[in-house]
Image (cartoon, rainbow, N blue to C red):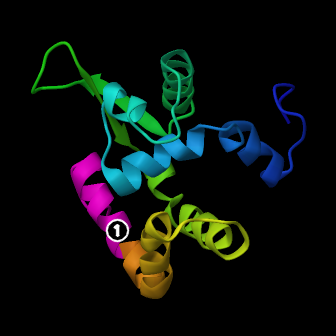
Amino acid sequence: MSQLHRSGCPINLTLEVLGDKWSLLILRDVIFADKRHFREWLQSPEGIASNILSDRLAMLVDEGLLTRASDPSHRQKVIYSLTEKSIALVPVLVQIGIWGRTFLPANEEASQMSRTLEDGGPALWEEIMTGLRERHLGHLPTA
């Protein structure tokens, strides 16, 4: 076990990467809203500050959850893409949304996506993950 981690517990290790206030929201926006540029995240309703966004994006790239590349449509922009590691979080994000909708005062409009994902079940989640692999990885993974 590395000295960089508090413990080797899988939950602890996951929270060390994803347990801050913003990382899952950034990934949520890439996965479900196709946000891929810095400025798009600044417009999210949660109101992330630009310095925090910059820090979290760098951490997500360092952890292998996002990749960063020059945007071919605009040479002064960068575009962020998901990796297989982050695409695998789709079922986790769905379950977090279901839990939040069930036990917290989520509003109806914000709950629509969660309800659709719950109703669609794992077959819909896999369909979403396949689409994300095509869009972000450029191919379908081999079996």
Give the image location of residue 40, x and y in percent: 33, 34
Q: Quadrant of the C terminus?
A: bottom left
Residue where numbered disc 1 is placed: 128
Name the element at disc 1: helix
Is residue 120 magenta-colored? no
Q: Quadrant of residue 102?
A: bottom right
Q: Quadrant of the N terminus?
A: top right
Q: Which residues are magenta?
A: 127-143
Disc 1 residue type (three-letter): Ile
Give the image location of residue 34, x and y in percent: 30, 48
In front here: 60 or 25? 25
Is residue 133 magenta-colored? yes
* Residue at the extreme left: 73
Give the image location of residue 118, x and y in percent: 51, 81
Side (left or right) of 113 relative to 103: left
Side (left or right) of 119 relative to 36: right
Picture residue at 89% right of the left edge, 34% below the top: 6
